[in-house]
């Protein structure tokens, strides 16, 4: 991978959703070249388009991911979600939408699902069933990867269930992301804000146990190890990230395996992180970083700025500063203010890519 100059040098690479060996090779390329790919949570066609537009602008691969709540929202909050039916439907529909439009943006896309706690396993199972059906017809899964977050369970149970699911996912050549240690804060209805602080930091032994258990099954797994991560955004100093722990995880695993930096690590709860912390994490083998809180704000900020700038035109269908009989349709049309939201989100997505050195990775001659 170190000899490649661009993701296009990877055999089988294409624009649009990539899976299996090709998706895994992107992560290997990122690790070798010391950059990471941000994974952005999406909730609608509009947020999907914003992520893809930014990826096209910075000319680099991108990850699009659905949380359980985001997927349910994608299907429509009025639908019955008994047995996670609406969340499954939203995930599958969203995946097909991404697959339909992503090739036109000219960059590779890794399609992922976010945190799935034990109580949400019916959602995970439903997506896997859709993956297996898609594989039977197309020779690849619908999604590139899924995250199984059983970090609230005892480590032995967490790892055992990950082994079980990775055995199943291996058949369709799919990537598993798992979490060991707990990411604090609140995310998508999961509240870990009161968790003991020692749970926010994984030990090298804990992380290696995951590698030891999963690597005989498949190489295609990533580990979201806890190094003080907290979901949400906080004032500087309120979150004590320790990216140096990532170096310790790699060193311990290297000593055990005889391989240099064998772990593929994931950075959760990074909103508001210092650039130096992000860079240290990438240098230590982080290949993926989740982003949600910051892009939620960015999307809203576009609407907020538009409203403040055009407030006089948004108080009724008729009547504005230009006259009592002047129509305002061109201002309250959703395509107008949603496009403003997309614009500020595009800028924030691009900024995150720059922080992670994920810029011009699709350029032919770097």
Image (tube, helix red, strand yellow):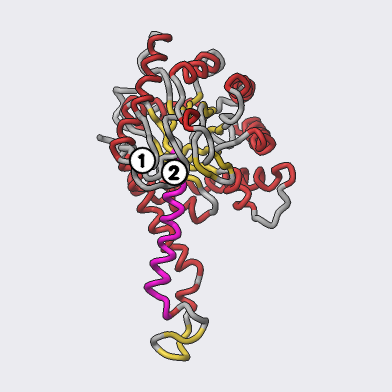
Residue located farthest toward the left when viewing the structure as drawn: 366
Residue 48 belongs to the span the image colors magenta:
no
* Residue positioned most to the bottom: 324
The residue under label 2 is 291
66 left or right of 237?
right
Q: Nearer the viewer, mark 2 or mark 1?
A: 2
- Secondary structure beneath label 2: strand
Is there a contact, CB below 8 Å, between mark 2 and mark 1? no
**Quadrant assignment for the N terminus:** top left
Q: Nearer the viewer, residue 334 or 258?
A: 258
At a point 61% along the width and 35% down the height, the residue shown is 117
Res 88 → quadrant: top right
Q: Residue at x 40, y 44 (%)?
A: 271
Q: Nearer the viewer, residue 83 or 187?
A: 187
- Residue 109 to residue 79: above or below: above
Q: Residue at x 68, y 48 (%)?
A: 86
Question: SS class of the residue under badge 1?
Answer: loop
Q: Quadrant of the C terminus?
A: top left
Q: Position of residue 85 (x, y in %)?
A: 71, 45
Q: Label for residue 60?
A: 1
Please report the bounds of the magenta region as a residue range: 290-312
Q: Position of residue 274 (x, y in %)?
A: 31, 41
How far across and how far down the image is residue 197, in percent?
Answer: 47, 32
């Amino acid at each position: 991978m170190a000899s490649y100059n661009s993701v296009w040098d990877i055999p089988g690479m294409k624009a649009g959703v990539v899976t299996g060996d090709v998706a895994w090779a992107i992560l290997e390329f990122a690790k070798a070249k010391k950059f990471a790919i941000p994974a952005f949570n999406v909730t609608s066609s509009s947020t999907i388009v914003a992520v893809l537009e930014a990826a096209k602008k910075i000319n680099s691969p991108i990850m699009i991911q659905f949380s359980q709540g985001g997927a349910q929202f994608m299907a429509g909050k009025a639908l019955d979600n008994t047995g996670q039916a609406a969340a499954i439907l939203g995930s599958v529909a969203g995946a097909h939408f991404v697959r339909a439009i992503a090739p036109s943006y000219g960059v590779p896309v890794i399609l992922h699902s976010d945190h799935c706690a034990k109580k949400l396993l019916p959602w995970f199972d439903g997506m896997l069933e859709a993956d297996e059906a898609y594989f039977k017809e197309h020779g690849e899964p619908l999604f590139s990867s899924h995250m199984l977050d059983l970090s609230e369970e005892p480590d032995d149970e967490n790892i055992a269930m990950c082994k079980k699911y990775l055995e199943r996912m291996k058949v369709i050549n799919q990537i598993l992301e798992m979490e060991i240690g707990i990411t604090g804060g609140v995310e998508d209805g999961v509240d870990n804000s009161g968790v003991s602080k020692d749970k926010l930091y994984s030990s090298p032994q804990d992380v290696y146990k995951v590698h030891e258990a999963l690597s005989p099954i498949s190489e295609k797994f990533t580990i979201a190890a806890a190094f003080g991560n907290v979901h949400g955004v906080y004032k500087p100093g309120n979150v004590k990230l320790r990216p140096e722990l990532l170096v310790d995880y790699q060193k311990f695993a290297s000593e055990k395996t005889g391989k240099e930096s064998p772990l593929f690590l994931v950075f959760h709860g990074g909103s508001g992180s210092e650039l130096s912390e992000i860079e240290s994490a990438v240098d230590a083998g982080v290949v993926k970083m989740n982003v949600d809180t910051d892009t939620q704000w960015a999307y809203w900020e576009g609407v907020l700025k538009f409203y403040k700038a055009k407030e006089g035109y948004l108080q009724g269908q008729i009547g504005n500063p230009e006259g009592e009989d002047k129509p305002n349709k061109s201002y309250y049309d959703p395509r107008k203010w949603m496009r403003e939201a997309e614009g500020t989100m595009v800028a924030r997505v691009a900024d995150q890519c720059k922080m992670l050195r994920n810029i011009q990775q699709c350029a032919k001659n770097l």
